[in-house]
Amino acid sequence: MDEVTKYARSIVNGEILAGKMMIMAAERHLNDLKMQNTADFPYYFDDKLLEGFLNFTKYVPDPKENIPIPLMPWQKFALGSIVAWRDNRTGGKRFKRAIVSIARENGKTYLASILATYDFFVQSYGKSNQDILIASNTAQQTGKLFNYTKSTVEKMLQGPFKKLSRTVRPREYDVVSRKTKNQIVRISADGGQGKFDSYHATTAIFDEAGDQKTRGAFGKITSGQTGNKEAIFFMISTAYQNPNAPLREDIRIITDAIKSGERKLDDNFLGVWAQDDENEIFEPETWIKSNPLLGLPNLKLEKTIGITSERDNLLAQGKLPDFLVKTMNMWVNAKEDAAFKLSDIEEVAIDSFDIDGRDVYVGFDNSMTSDDAALAFIFPYTDENGNQKWHLYQHSFIPWHKAGSIDAKESQDGINYRQMQGLGYATITPHEKGLISNDDIYEWLLEFVDKHHLKVLKFTYDWAHNSAFIKSLEANTYWEIQAVKQGTLTLNEPTKWLQDAFVEGRVTTFKDPMMEKSLVNAIITSDNNGIKIDKNKATMKIDLVDAIIDALSEGIHYFEDYGTGEYYF
């Protein structure tokens, strides 16, 4: 049995303790083996190529030890999957993109340097003008990985590839073959992304990809790889304290695609070694989920002691999120004043909810300058166990006038608004100048209420924005309309209620990326009268959260007042 399949079976059989994400990856590999070379699955696993690759790795020195170190099973799984899964239509790689995420201090730099040197010495053999990119967010981050890779090349030129030492030149910012013009290039995103355009990388490695705020650099790299059957964009990173990072969204998208079974994104590899639950910080026997190096008997005790010490010190300093992110490889909302925990937000997201014919509270947050306008809908309901709950839904209206274009607006806010529009969570303004029309919001709202036969119990809005939109609703509906003052005296109760509701699971949401992003962006401010929601900067969107709070100012009392009156629309 090949090494990749052996590791996958060991995980699925429970012989190796693994988190949910790696169990999913292992099951995917085993299922794909059964599907290979079928009409709906044009891929196959080349175990002979895998064997050759693993033989190559035996000659690659570890950057710290200066000698080759046998790969662990998890390393063979990650790199072996990337190299040995092939596309039978082209003969090239199956995986065009790969994400590997592990906790810090687990040898991710070694993985990346192996992949880069394999391309340089083996995959690109007999070819010319091949670009291998070593990239990261900053020159400092890139420098570490590049220096490791360059050091590896230098040592291999003294050993198995000594014949190439006359033509291969490791330099400060690149490694170049004078004969073939193949090169390993050091490059970073902090000096601007245009520089990526000049390369057509066979292997592009982006270290600490979780620290990127937008996909700009990623897109520049992958756009230059489309014509190469061996091209791979390899993103490697730990988790970060920004749950809105594109890398985390990509992990979610690929995860959903794998779980759906619809054969989408079959050319994306995903390997995430992470803890499943925050409570596992007190269970050292589970830490191998995020720290696979604990599988080495000679390192286990020393590393466990080190992780335990780090945990205890950070707990004493009140910095638990730092430990969860860096050492447990868990994405968390680590802002000290964060209104909601990411894990709580994720926990209440559900796949479906029938809104038709229901009672609803509506909240409205109007657009100011670059802000979106947002409508929030609160649906009180009783679940199958008799629990009183509230389902949250939102629809946002997106201007782009101040940004200059919808492309610039998406880049500025870090949200794919066109995708959100397709999913039914947003409407991009059709206005030729990118302005929001309250008439459009008015028409959308009435149509939505009519289409779903909703019973609007109360419509709430920011009292400072008493626009013609509100006057139209007052004139043309029977809804009870309530202005909500935006101070802590008024907003304290619904804000605190919403915080507790996420913790206790009293609310549910759709799997709406816009809502998740806004909830993550929300922070708490306070004064002598209480607390309310705020944000750190203008481009951190929380408009829909404001609308939710407005609606909840009335909606939280639904079950107390239920049945006391009749409402019409």
Image: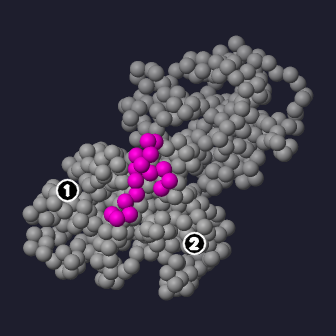
Label 1 or label 2, whichever lies nearer to me, is: 2
Mark 1 neighbour class, 10 Å CA radius: few under 14, some 14 to 19, many 20 or more: many
The x and y percentages for residue 74 are: 47, 70
Dot 1: element: loop
Location of residue 317 with respect to 357 vertically, above or below: below
Location of residue 315 with respect to 127 vertically, above or below: below
Q: Which mark is residue 16?
A: 2
Location of residue 457 with respect to 344 vertically, above or below: above
Q: As shown in the figure, which amino acid type bears the numbered disc 1?
A: Gln
Q: As shown in the figure, which amino acid type bears the numbered disc 2?
A: Ile
Q: Residue at x 22, y 56 (%)?
A: 131
- N-terminal-most mark, 1 or 2: 2
Instruction: Give yes or no for residue 189 being in the magenta stretch.
Output: no
Which residue, given by chain and number where applicable, does mark 1 sit on? Answer: 130
The x and y percentages for residue 154 are: 21, 76
What is the magenta range? 33-49
The x and y percentages for residue 470 are: 65, 21
Extreme-right residue of the structure:
564
Dot 2: element: loop
Q: Residue at x 69, y 32 (%)?
A: 377
Report the side of 465 relative to 437 (left or right): right
**In this rendering, does residue 563 appear at all?**
yes
